[in-house]
Amino acid sequence: MKLGVNIAPHGAPAVASAAERLGYDVAFVPEGYRTDAISVLGMLAGRTEHIGLATGVLQIPARSAVMTAMTAATLETLAPGRVRLGLGVSNAHIAEGWHGVRFDRPLRRAREYVEIVRLALNDEPVKYRGDFNELPLPGARGEPFHQFGGPLGAAIPIYLAAIGPRSLELAGEIADGWFGVFCSPERIAESVPHIHAGRDKAGAPDKGFEVIPSVPVVVGRSPGEAADAVRHYIARFVSLGTKEHSFYHALMKRMGYPDEADAVYDRYASGDRAGAAAAVPFGFVDATALLGPLERIAEKMTAYAEAGVTTLALSPFARTTEEQQSILRVATEALDRAGLA
C-alpha cells in the first residue's frame, strides 16, 4: 500500500516537498467552492521533481470535458508522467447553487464526460453525441479538434469519485481508480465488489485499478482529543445541500448514525456550527480517520490494506505546515511499522 497526501493551497509547496522527500507516491489537490485544484498543481509541478500530481477531485459541473482534457494535457507538459486526473460529479448544492448546472442523471453525465476526456487525451477527433453533450455542434465549421500532438490517454490515469453502489460500479467500468471519502476499512471492503462488477462489465482486469480513500490523520496520545480536529470538517460535509439530497448525510446514516446525522445537519442549518461539530459521533470519526499514537495508526493502516486499499490519501489535520509535515513523517513510520512499506 502506497501513501498519498491531500494538500491545501496554504503551505502547499512545503508540504508537497516534504511528502516527496518522505517517499509519498502522489499529492492530491482538492477543490471546493472557494479554491480550485489546477492553480495549486501548476505551482507544484514547478516545485517538485518526481511525486505524482493529481486532482482530488475536479468538479465535473465546473468545466467542459474538453477544457479538462486541455488542462490535464498542459499539466502533463509541465510534469511529464506525473499527472493523474481525479473527477467527481460534486453534489446538487455545488452544481446547481454555485455552477448553475442541473444535477439530474449525474452518472450519465459522468460517463459522457469521461468518454469525451479520453477522446481528447487520445488525440482523436472529438466527435460525440450524448444525452448531455454534442461535439461539434450542428453546423460547426471545420473538422473536429485533435491537436495535442500525440495520445496522452495512457499516460494520464482517470480516477472517479464515488459513494453509492451504482457510482462505484461506474468507476470500475470506465475509470482507472476510485477516489473515496469518509471510508472505513469495512466500507472499503463492501465497496470493492461493486468495483469488480464494473471491471467485469468492461472486460477489464482488476489488476492496476487504484482504490484510494481520502483519510484524515491526527497524531496524539488520545484518540478522543485527536478526533476533535476533524469534527468541523465532517460536519460541513454532512450539512451540504438539503437533508434529502446530501450524499454525506445519507452516508453517515448508512454507517450506523441516523440520529447523529440529523443532529449534525439540523444544528449546522440553524447556524450552530460548533454544536454541529460536537454532534459528530466519535465512532464515525474513528472509523473514517487515523487517530492517536503511531502504533494505533499502524494498526488501522493494516486494516485498510487488508480491505483492498492501494493508495491511502492522507489529510494531515494540523494548524501549521510544520505540524503537517510532522504528521506525514509519523505516517511513514507507521506504514513501516505495519510492514506495508
Image: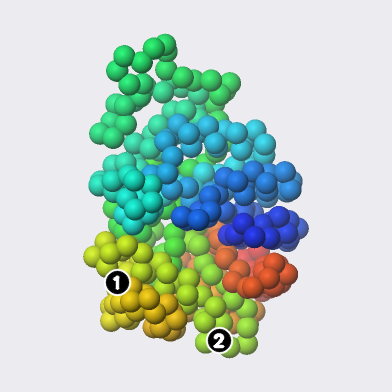
Q: Which image quarter holds the C terminus?
A: bottom right
Q: Where is 135 relative to 74, above or below?
A: above
Q: Which mark's residue is nearer the viewer, 2 or 1?
A: 2
Q: Residue at x 54, y 70 (%)?
A: 216
Question: Of callouts 2 and 1, which one flags the residue occurring earlier in the amino acid sequence?
Answer: 2
Q: Local crowd at mark 1 within 10 Å, few (<14), some, or many (≥20)?
A: few
Q: 153 and 135: which one is in front?
A: 135
Q: Could you tell me the amino acid type at mark 1? A: Arg
> Which residue does the image show at 56% across and 82% down from the upper left?
226
Q: Is residue 29 left or right of residue 62?
A: right
- Kindly give the residue lying farthest to the front in the view shown: 271
Q: Where does label 2 land, which residue? A: 225
Task: Quadrant for residue 331, please give it.
Answer: bottom right
- The residue indicated by pointer 1 is 254
Q: Position of residue 244 (x, y in %)?
A: 24, 65
Q: Does residue 186 appear anywhere in the picture?
A: yes
Residue positioned 48% across, 37% down in the render: 68
In the image, what residue occupies the spot 55% across and 62% down?
312
Residue 202 coordinates in the image, percent (x, y) = 35, 40
Its colouring scheme is rainbow
Q: Secondary structure at mark 1?
A: helix
Inspect the image, locate mark 2, and give the three-letter code of the amino acid beneath it. Glu
